[in-house]
Image (cartoon, rainbow, N blue to C red):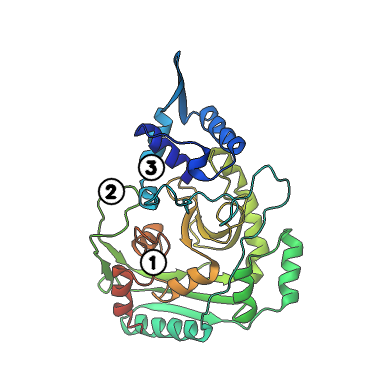
């Protein structure tokens, strides 16, 4: 998706480009261009001297709908664009027939007991404001528990997810709601805007996830069945098949789910939805990182635009250090 955005923008701005621009094999880049032409994102203009390209109406609409990628263009053409990733941080040819290779996972230094402290503190703060909520943190899972799930769903669970459920808790239920007259208004004028539109103030009314909890290994098999049921949606998503290549670990009860990318940007937490504008939206570098940032803002938000309001142009993930995040932390009295 990011590669398509970059190529379309270069065509529109009449900039030269080739496989060398993206550190991609020439044959692989040729296949990509043929795909983009076949799917009507790019039209071919032929004359007596050379072949040139132009974005089609579909290509222009793609550019318009994905303006968020503008902030990810590298400053120097010598940089390997971090957003051109096919099988993780290191480029791996799609011609290889092996199963997707997990991106090398490096555990972060995270104090899990602090997660528990923040969740309890957040719930107390909400109740003091007249709101409601619930918190349940279960015991850790065993390695055998994980192996049984992997055997049933047919693939290994992401390393970051396994580390959390084995070292911390197999299940964490957490949600809260506050009264409409006691909300936190996010009003940072520099907020990351998904589509180049003016940022509108948002009132945060709730947090966490009610139906499935933040995660629960006992629901993973059911969630995997839901993921399979949604794979047909990928037929309408011509660039990437996120449903087919994700591990779903929870949902919001409104038809939207949280997954971990198993193919394109391996290990990233992504948003899975029927809304084409936000399907595949990135929420965290890894499961641990996503939770660490989200828990540090009390798991605030109940909609994708809330999560978007907690990101920034330079860090498109949920980030607990943005202006809006710091405002929520102050409102929730999170230290």
Residue at the top extreme of this rendering: 48
Residue 319 lies left or right of residue 324; in this view the side is: right
Picture quarter with the C terminus: bottom left
- In what element is the residue under mark 3? helix
* Residue 252: x %, y % from top left: 49, 62
Q: Residues within 10 Å of mark 1 (few under 14, many from 20)?
A: many
Chain-order first, disc 1 or disc 2: 2
* Residue 302: x %, y % from top left: 41, 64
Residue placed under numbered mark 1 in the picture: 301
> Residue 181, relative to residue 123: is it above or below?
above
Task: Calculate the distance from the C-alpha at mark 2 to the C-alpha at mark 3.
Answer: 11 Å
Instruction: Determine if residue 296 is in view.
Output: yes
Residue placed under numbered mark 3 in the picture: 65
User: Image quarter for residue 156?
Assistant: bottom right
Q: Residues within 10 Å of mark 3 (few under 14, many from 20)?
A: some
Instruction: Determine if residue 212 is in view.
Output: no
> Residue 62, relative to residue 224: is it above or below?
above
Contact between marks 1 and 3 (CB within 8 A): the answer is no
């Amino acid at each position: 998706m990011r590669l398509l955005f970059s190529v379309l923008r270069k065509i529109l701005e009449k900039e030269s480009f080739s496989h060398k621009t993206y550190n991609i094999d020439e044959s692989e880049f040729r296949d990509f261009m043929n795909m983009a032409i076949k799917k009507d994102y790019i039209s071919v203009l032929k004359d007596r001297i050379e072949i040139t390209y132009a974005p089609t109406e579909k290509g222009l609409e793609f550019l318009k709908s994905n303006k968020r990628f503008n902030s990810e263009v590298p400053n120097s053409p010598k940089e390997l664009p971090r957003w051109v990733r096919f099988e993780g941080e290191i480029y791996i040819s799609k011609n290889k027939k092996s199963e997707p290779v997990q991106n090398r996972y490096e555990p972060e230094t995270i104090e899990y007991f602090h997660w528990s402290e923040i969740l309890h503190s957040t719930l107390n703060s909400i109740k003091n404001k007249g709101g409601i909520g619930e918190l349940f943190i279960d015991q850790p899972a065993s390695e055998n528990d994980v192996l049984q799930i992997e055997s049933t769903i047919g693939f290994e669970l992401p390393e970051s997810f396994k580390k959390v459920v084995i070292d911390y808790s197999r299940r964490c239920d957490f949600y809260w709601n506050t009264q409409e007259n006691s909300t936190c208004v996010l009003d940072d004028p520099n907020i990351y805007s998904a589509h180049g539109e003016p940022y509108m103030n948002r009132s945060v009314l709730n947090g966490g996830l009610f139906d499935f909890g933040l995660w629960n290994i006992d629901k993973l098999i059911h969630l995997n069945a839901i993921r399979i049921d949604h794979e047909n949606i990928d037929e309408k998503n011509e660039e990437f098949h996120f449903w087919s290549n994700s591990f779903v670990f929870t949902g919001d009860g409104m038809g939207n789910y949280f997954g971990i990318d198993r193919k394109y940007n391996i290990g990233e937490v992504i948003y899975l939805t029927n809304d084409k504008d936000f399907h595949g939206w990135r929420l965290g570098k890894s499961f641990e990182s996503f939770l660490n940032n989200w828990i540090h803002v009390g798991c605030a938000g109940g909609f994708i635009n809330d999560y978007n309001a907690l990101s920034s142009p330079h860090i498109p993930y949920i980030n607990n250090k943005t202006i809006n995040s710091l405002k929520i932390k102050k409102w929730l009295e999170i230290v």
